[in-house]
Image: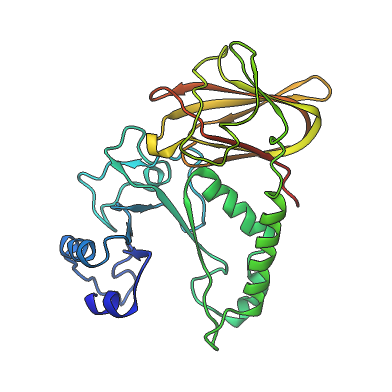
Amino acid sequence: MREVVKNYGPFFEFWWDGANGEGPNGKKQNYDWRAYEQTLRNIAPQSIIFSDIGPDARWAGNEKGFAGETNWNLLDTVGFKRGEGAPSTDTLQQGNVFGKNWIPAECDVSIRPGWFYHANEDSLVKTPNELLNLYLKSVGRGANLLLNVPPDERGLINEKDSAALMGFKKLRDESFAKNVLEHALFSFNENAIDYKNTLLGDHDENTFIKPGIGNDSGFTYTFSKPEMLNCIELQEPIRNGQRVKSFSIFLKLIDGNIKEIKGTTIGHKRMLTFSKAMVQSFSVVIHSSKGEPLISEMKAYIIHD
């Protein structure tokens, strides 16, 4: 390990897989994980260590590429170990609301049915729309997305995979190019004083507002003319911790009806999607939080098909 790090680094992440000796001919290996971790901390202190229980990033409990709709960055690890003996998949998906360790989720998935290249799977490469959906259910739920793209027999990224990736990039860039809140009117619900969208649109994750808790608190965005929306993004200032436990977004539609979109955790980023709607305004109300809720960024988009 020292040789690899010294001669081929720097490395962003070390993946300590939970698989160990599965299958009829599998051979279990015994690892001194404490020694490995101490060595890596000494020779690669900036590298992230991933496993079922971290210590820096955790498995999201599946290999389908999505995090739980409720996703806490906290995890209790006492009494658990990597592989057999890891926390339940439900716990790994959701984290622990009052967990003792800060271990964000990482979602792993392959662009193909399996982890390695097979020519007979060229027609089964995930489409740009499928990749965007995975992005929304991983990054959009406050997790990291690790997408496996296996090299083919030539040692190259296959043309099918490359085309899907470029299509995904184009779709993502087009969908998130315009934040329709940039020119919307912002107001706190409790006093209805209008503000320019400075703190929530300054692209600074360290600035924030304090929206309060309860139906009479929160804040509202009002458009000068109705806007077509199907995605709203919220962020907490994650350096101050993850706090929000539940919230609602109330869309005022052009016919006067109110549509409620419910959410639980926010964390670094939460992207809520819904059917396309012409919206006059919308309000955000925090229902419950571990402490005083803080919101650092708000954006709204129309995601392209």
| Along the viewing direction, whichever of 22 and 129 lies nearer the viewer | 129
Q: Is residue 192 positioned above or below 79 on the image?
A: above
Residue 84 locus on image (x, y percent) = 27, 57
| Along the viewing direction, whichever of 185 and 68 lies nearer the viewer | 185
| Residue 276 in sight from this viewpoint | no
Residue 245: quarter of image: top left
Q: Residue at x 58, y 53 (%)?
A: 135
Q: Is residue 27 left or right of residue 208?
A: left
| Picture mark count | 0
Q: Residue at x 60, y 82 (%)?
A: 119
Residue 120 locus on image (x, y percent) = 62, 80
Residue 282: quarter of image: top right
Q: Is residue 53 left or right of residue 203?
A: left
Residue 257 locus on image (x, y percent) = 77, 20
Quarter holding the N terminus is: bottom left
Q: Residue at x 64, y 55 (%)?
A: 132
Q: Is residue 282 positioned above or below 266 on the image?
A: above
**Colour scheme used in the picture?**
rainbow
Q: Is residue 162 left or right of residue 147?
A: right
Q: Residue at x 58, y 54 (%)?
A: 134
| Residue 288 in sight from this viewpoint | yes
Residue 277 locus on image (x, y percent) = 78, 34
